[in-house]
Amino acid sequence: MSLALLPARRTPATAHQLALAVAIALAFADSSIVVLALPELYVEFDTTIPRLSWVVTAYNLAVAVAIVPLVPLARRVRPGALALVGLVLFFAASIGCALADGLGPLVAGRTVQGLGAALLLAASLPLLIALDGSSERAVSTWVTAGTIGVAVGPALGGLLTEVFDWRAIFAVQAPVAAAALLAALHPRSRWARPDAAAPSGVLPVAPNIGLVLAFAALVGALFLAVLLVVTVWDYGPLAGAGIVSALPLAALAARPLSRRLTASLDVAGGALLLAAGLTALALLPSTNPVYAVLALALSGAGLGLALPPLTRASLGGEGDVTRKGVFSVGARHLGLVVGLVAVAPVLAVALDDGAERATQNATAVILDAPLPLTQKLPIALDLYREFQAAPDGEIPDLTAPFEERADEPAVQEVGDSLLETVEAALTRSFRSSFALSALFALLAGVTALAFRRGRLNA
Amino acid sequence: MSRRLQGLVALAALGAAALILIAVELAQGARDYGELAVEDPCTATVSAAGEGLDATAQQILLDGLNGAACELGTTREELVLSFEPELGADIGWDRETIERAVRSGLLNSVDEAEERGSLGGLSATLLRELIERAPLDLLIEGGGQLADLLN
């Protein structure tokens, strides 16, 4: 988009901008919004974990794959029209997801939602500039919406799942998309016109690589941590949302700090904090959620510091801002897909080992339990039946044999010890995946060198 | 203090907080948390909880399992899990070898219990007969019923 085409009168259209900013934040949040609802979906659709993971992957893959081919389209079609089509798709797909009666329709809905989000995000920056009248303020709004959206996703989804149902996650998105439609239809959206003849400019490579790596690292905080809290530690969506909300809260709290530092320090310091938070998650010494909250808060602070300068730099320099915005969005979603693809096999192997460790340690707990044989053997046999009854890939209900004997404190103690042992072995299984995520964060920090050399402005 | 210096101090404080958190985690046992925690069956010493015949029966069972696991070069836990193929533990021996090792381990622990004086001569003879003749599954499940009878 050529900014020179903007009319002289540049007073912002605040309500429309806000509606659009919320939709942008939501499109970013959708990357991870459904994670805390996965256990509920797993039960409702009676599926396997690899198939279920497509509810998350389909959206991110659709955005990552669709957004780059949109560059030539975005140079020919008005951003308002592009956003309109994107929001209509997003609106319809959100309703479709909310009404889905099977995993297939839900994954199909998430794919269409991703396509809609790609169109919306490709058009959102020039549209915001047109609505605001100030390029600088619009970029700042876009960066803030993107940062908050990414960080708030799991907590928001968990809250909606606990208070209502997993369908509420998608039901609330439809009115948000409808409200943003008003922004796309605002007369001022016509001020944003494509200019196919405008010079493309040089694409800032280092910040986009930094975004890819930072988002690959974020898979640890956004997906792995949530999976650990919900599936291994067995917290409900609301309690899980409470734990993971440390991430967005810390990201918001770190924003004022980022303004006091240079961009290179923001990126380097933020990436190091993100890596430290992920390392702390890898080194959890118990299932006490305080450690996870503190580690997620560090990760969030790192995110709040590193993400804004990386995003601003990815949009900076001379040339077409629409094209740069598209690549910036693509880099984020590519990072998430890279992170998921890299971490998933590592976690799968580690969980297999962890399950074996858990079984052996649990057997030791039962064999050495300070209980008479008359109690020990029936418990061991009941546990064995629970193992047999559990579907493949699911943790058996280890509490059931102990609940039947709830009036015996010694038996309860053994039950607690058994559960702790299993949770400890499975928690340890996440260690290598968190460490891999931390490595991505450290690599993202290397891109700070490009800022230090003064080649980039954020 | 300039804004930039304030920012640097805050960043340094966050870095220090990160290091402290990791140090506390390591001090709280992060290194071994969730690690495999099973004893070497060849050196493990069993002290069954409780007293009386129940404790004796458990001591014999656990000693016997340790002895069998040591002979087969596996852990006591893997040996127990291998009794049921559905639990997925494959210790690399056929069923016959496992049964022979378990019976031998249990017989040794009956001998030791008799030597210690915690098992009378008649009970020891009866147990040896049972260990030599009863199928392994029955032996394990029968342990509970035996303990019932003893109590």
Image: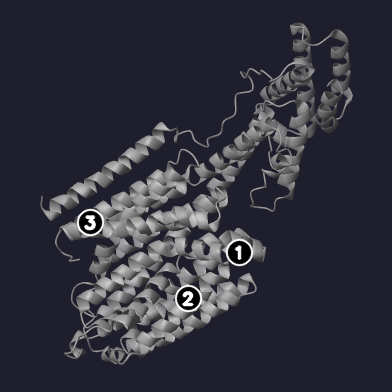
Dot 1 or dot 3, earlier in sequence: 1
Point out which mark residue A70 bears.
none
- Which secondary structure, mark 3? helix
Compared with B66, A170 (above or below) is below
Mark positioned earlier in the residue sequence (2 or 3): 2
Quadrant in which the N terminus of chain A is drawn: bottom left
Q: Earlier in the sequence, mark 1 or mark 2?
A: 1
Residue wearing tag 3: A257
Tag 1 subunit: A
Q: Residue at x 20, y 66 (%)?
A: A458
Res A271 seen here:
yes
Mark 3 is surrounded, within 10 Å at the Cα level, by few (under 14), some (14 to 19) or many (20 or more) other residues, namely many
Disc 2/disc 3 C-alpha distance (Å):
32 Å
Q: Tell me if label 1 and label 3 are in contact, CB under 8 Å.
A: no
Report which residue position mark 1 lands on: A41
User: For this view, does A309 lie left or right of residue A352?
Assistant: left
The chain letter for the residue carrying disc 3 is A
Q: Chain of mark 2?
A: A
Q: From the image, tell me which residue sits under label 2.
A: A173
Q: Is residue A313 left or right of residue B89?
A: left
For the residues labelled 1 and 3, the Cα–Cα distance comes to 39 Å
Q: Position of residue A101 (x, y in %)?
A: 65, 74
